[in-house]
Image (cartoon, rainbow, N blue to C red):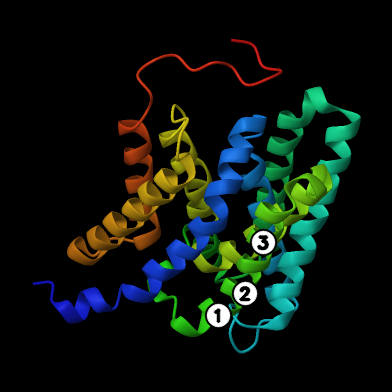
Amino acid sequence: MTTLADIGLLAAPFAAGLLVLATHVPLGIEVLRRGIIFLDLAVAQMAALGVLVAHLLEWDAPDVAHGLGVQAAAAVAAILGALLLTWSEKRWPQLQEALIGLMFVVAASAGMLLLSGNPHGGEHLRDLLGGQVLWVGWDRLGPVAALYAVLLLAWFAWPARLGRAGFYLAFALAVTASVQLVGVFLVFASLIAPAVATAGVTRRRLPLACALGALGYAAGLMLSLAFDLPAGAAIVCSLGLIAVLMLPRGRLAAAPGHAT
């Protein structure tokens, strides 16, 4: 039987989810507007690749989630991916979505190659993809909150000054932190599901998207607690279900530059 004490254990994971949503919802809406849906997956996978490299170089002792070497490796890999995508968007804009998808699959395959000789490779890969949000503690949220606050300030205070390169850089830094909190799959769901769920909304879209994202995290965490399910997978499924249920009934207008 689920008790109040059990529910209290979900407070830190839920707070982590709210932090992730704070940056990922506005970024996800922008990704959807630009039509570069797999950007988040590609950059998140690059950050995960950086984490794996740091692990193999033993920069993660004693804890993979807290080592500065891991943070630096993840950030460098994500920023490198963002810079490459900034350059490719200028040079081959018509191929950008394909190149984003290619970056994702290459980074994922490189990670598999790096772990091929590691007896615990499957476990590390599963943790990076599915995440371990249920075990996030309060001590990990402070630095992430500070980073997100800076990114949100730049995003809302000086949106015109960011430009294309600034957008990719902010995206890379946000994803670097969130991948290590919630995993690659939940990063993608946090970005895309609320944006899709509110695709037909013209007024107060951002607060509605954040509220739906919070509902998805709460439902997924409660399902995980009640039925002993993997928390990350439960939240992803909850966010996906909410997005499907909230899909606009009418046909949406095509984004600029895209065929109807």
- Residue type at the position of mark 1: Gly
Please, which residue is most extreme toward the top here? 260
Q: Is residue 37 left or right of residue 159?
A: left
Can you give x and y, in whole percent of width and height, for residue 132 in the image?
44, 68
Of the 4 image quadrants, the one containing the N terminus is: bottom left
- Alpha-carbon span between mark 1 and mark 2: 6 Å
Q: Which residue is mark 2?
A: 146
**Which image quarter: residue 228?**
bottom left
- Residue type at the position of mark 3: Leu
Q: Which residue is mark 3?
A: 153
Can you give x and y, in whole percent of width and height, for residue 153 in the image?
67, 61
- Residue type at the position of mark 2: Ala
Work out whether mark 2 precedes mark 3 in sequence or the reverse, and give the earlier one: 2
Q: Is residue 32 left or right of residue 111?
A: left
Residues at discs 1 and 2 in contact (Cβ within 8 Å):
yes
Give 163 or 40, whichever is nearer the viewer: 163
- Alpha-carbon span between mark 3 and mark 1: 17 Å
Please, which residue is most extreme toward the right here? 91
What numbered label is drawn on residue 142? Answer: 1
Which residue does the image show at 34% across and 61% down from the upper left? 230
Give 58 or 43, whichever is nearer the viewer: 43
